[in-house]
Amino acid sequence: MQALCGMLVAALLWYRKFRGDLESEQYVFNPYNPCVANKTIEKKQHTVRFQVDDLMASHVLPKINDRFDTCGSTRCMATAVRSNAFVAKSMIALG
């Protein structure tokens, strides 16, 4: 039971950090779906969607997605989000 609770807490902490990181980059979250954020970049919409262990970023220009992926590996933790185990390890490392 403690492991399950720990996974839920880790996921919530990761969500709060990831949301805060995106908001600090001026992404606006959808009021109807808290796992969708948008930002206008180069006059086109960049959409970030995330759910449990899946993350999708889409933009008309591939370089924008590549730049987001690079940002994710250092600041937003967007890359390699594949499992709750990764999330738990990340939260432990973040302190």
Image: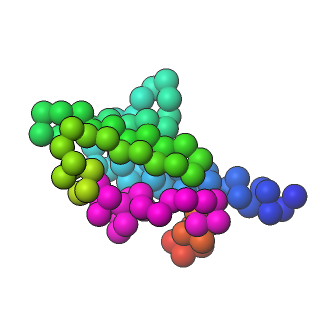
- Residue 90 picture quarter: bottom right
Task: Say which of 5 and 72 sits in front.
Answer: 72
Inspect the magenta stretch and tell me whether residue 69 lies in it.
yes
Q: Residue at x 31, y 41 (%)?
A: 58
Q: Tell me the residue at 38%/42% (across/down).
A: 48
- Where residue 80 appears, as percent x and y from the top left, is 47, 63
Can residue 95 be seen? no
Residue 76, x across and y down, in percent: 38, 59
Q: In this view, does 62 lie to the left or right of 10?
A: left
Q: Residue furthest top?
A: 32
Looking at the rendered image, the quarter that the C terminus falls into is bottom right
Q: Is the magenta stretch mostly helix, strand or loop?
A: helix
- Magenta region: 68-86
**In the figure, 91 relative to 64: above or below?**
below
**Does residue 89 show up?**
yes
Position in image of residue 53 (x %, y %): 57, 52
Residue at figure coordinates x 48%, y 44% from the top left: 50
Q: Front-most of 59 and 4?
A: 59
Q: Which residue is drawn at 55% across and 59% down?
A: 82
Q: In this view, does 35 lie to the left or right of 39?
A: right
Q: Nearer the viewer, residue 46 or 30?
A: 46
**Furthest residue to the right?**
1
